[in-house]
Amino acid sequence: MKYDYDLFVIGAGSGGVRAARIASLAGARVAVAEEYRIGGTCVIRGCVPKKFLVYGAEFSQMLADAPGYGWTVGAASFDWPTLRDNVQREVTRLSGIYTTNLAKAGVTAFEERADLVDAHTVRLAKSGSEFTAERILIATGGRPYLPEGLPGLQFGISSNEAFLLEKFPERVLIVGGGYVALEFANIFHGLGSKTRIVHRGDKLLRGFDEDLRVHMHIEAERGGTQLTMKSTLTQIERVSGELRATLSTGEHVDTDVVLFAIGREPHTAGLGLERAGVKLDEAGAVIVNEFSQSSVESVYAIGDVTNRFNLTPVAIRDGHAFADTIYNQRPTPVDHSSVPSAVFGRPPIGTVGLSEADARRSFDAVDIYRTSFRPMRNMLAGNPERTLMKIVVDAKSGKLLGVHIAGEDAPEMIQLAAVAVKAGLTKQQWDSTMALHPTAAEELMREKVSGPSSSA
Ligand SMILES: Cc1cc2nc3c(=O)[nH]c(=O)nc-3n(C[C@H](O)[C@H](O)[C@H](O)COP(=O)(O)OP(=O)(O)OC[C@H]3O[C@@H](n4cnc5c(N)ncnc54)[C@H](O)[C@@H]3O)c2cc1C
């Protein structure tokens, strides 16, 4: 045979594992290399462990809400090693399932780093072995971006280390204003840390709908997270056993942990892509066409390393579509429109489709339906947290363009709202569905929530 394998996948994360399994089950001879742990970012140090920590953090609010419902709550305390180790045990279990599923599908897994020698050859870093493959799939994901050159950077951590902290921090300083920053602020604050976000922008969550951004700012502060906007870190020092961060305003902040959550970059450095002639964009992402094929015929890329929509279900869909296209003779381009996403902050966000600002840029006239209220659950509890719901509609066709929710269960609601947006339903069709009472979601079904309040 001309090549050692039909397909060599680099990276056993969400996308790589799916592509490898489907290709192998279709009859291809497939190998995969993983330099850290099989399962990738989502399973090992992303979505999964994060969601468990979010669940853990939610208990503090439930305990605070309980007396309004007649409960007397005794002295409650939180033990970080218990939560951390339980989460890690579950992560290890899931990683094991991924490993087993690869083996069951007949995929050969190498648990070491790999790079490209040329457009058909992969080299394993530890063993030095080289393998040829008809096609190579780059599925190396992304990694936390760090402010290289910042004095004292070595005292900071990224989300990778946050899951494994030896000791639970009394104080946490989070640098960044994206979804990872907000989620870790929710986690640490909910588990009992004094939490502060420092962000160079004037608002959190760039790219999200403006009303959501304002709402989350208000709710984060109301909940007790300190927000310092338009500010950056200029150095970190270790002073008598604790960390001292200096802000661009000159303020010194004493803290136990500095967590950088200032974005992620495609994991392409040192992969040898230049040796194969694979073109990257200015962010270092592999440039691909709608079938995930790079500028080199035999090299494909999927998931976060292509920096299209950096979410697990997208990486999985990319991987499956690639395998179907090549090995099941079913050409399948991936449609990256109307991808729902969530932010597990306090309150959580669920969002799909266009923000109001993006809709106004693309459509002549836009109707906005918006409501903000204290959900029923919070009334007896005396909990001031508010929910925001917003629907963006094309005024001419009546089609739903976007749905944005910040409130309890918003991620659960938005998964289904995404069906309506993706299917191109109209607001009239949406409204013709009977509401379900008593729920928070029924507020989305009001014929006229508070609008149409404006059109341009
Ligand atoms: C803190 C955090 C929270 C997140 N929360 C969510 C969420 O709630 N929902 C959601 O949908 N997404 C979430 N994500 C994003 C999600 O994790 C990614 O979109 C997803 O994992 C991308 O899958 P992938 O296959 O492209 O890459 P990854 O899952 O990152 O897999 C890439 C793999 O390649 C390996 N690798 C890299 N280079 C090499 C090499 N040279 N040789 C061998 N192996 C290599 C890496 O070790 C890694 O295991 C989160 C991410 C983070 C960091």
Image (cartoon, rainbow, N blue to C red):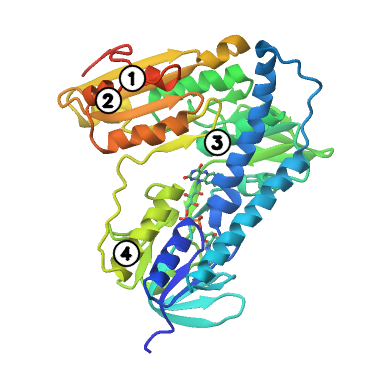
Q: Is residue 231 left or right of residue 28?
A: right
Instruction: Name the mark nearer the viewer: 2 or 3.
Output: 2
Give the amino acid type for the residue marked by disc 2 in the picture.
Trp
Q: Which mark is residue 213?
A: none
Number of numbered discs on residues: 4
Against 116, is 129 above or below?
below
Q: Is residue 222 left or right of residue 413?
A: right
Q: What residue is shown with label 2? A: 430
Q: Residues within 10 Å of mark 4 (few under 14, many from 20)?
A: some
Residue drawn where x is 35% and y is 20% of the image = 435
Asked whether 194 or 409 is in front, the reply is 409
Q: Residues within 10 Å of mark 1 (few under 14, many from 20)?
A: some
Task: Tell me, yes or no, whether the two marked residues, 2 and 1, touch with CB atoms within 8 Å.
Answer: yes
Residue 348 pos. (x, y %): 51, 29
Q: What's the distance in space between the residues labelled 2 and 1, CA to CA? A: 7 Å
Which badge, 1 or 4, comes first in the chain's sequence?
4
Residue 421 pos. (x, y %): 29, 34
Q: What residue is shown with label 4? A: 324
**Quadrant of the rendered image containing residue 392:** top left
Q: Which mark is residue 445?
A: 1
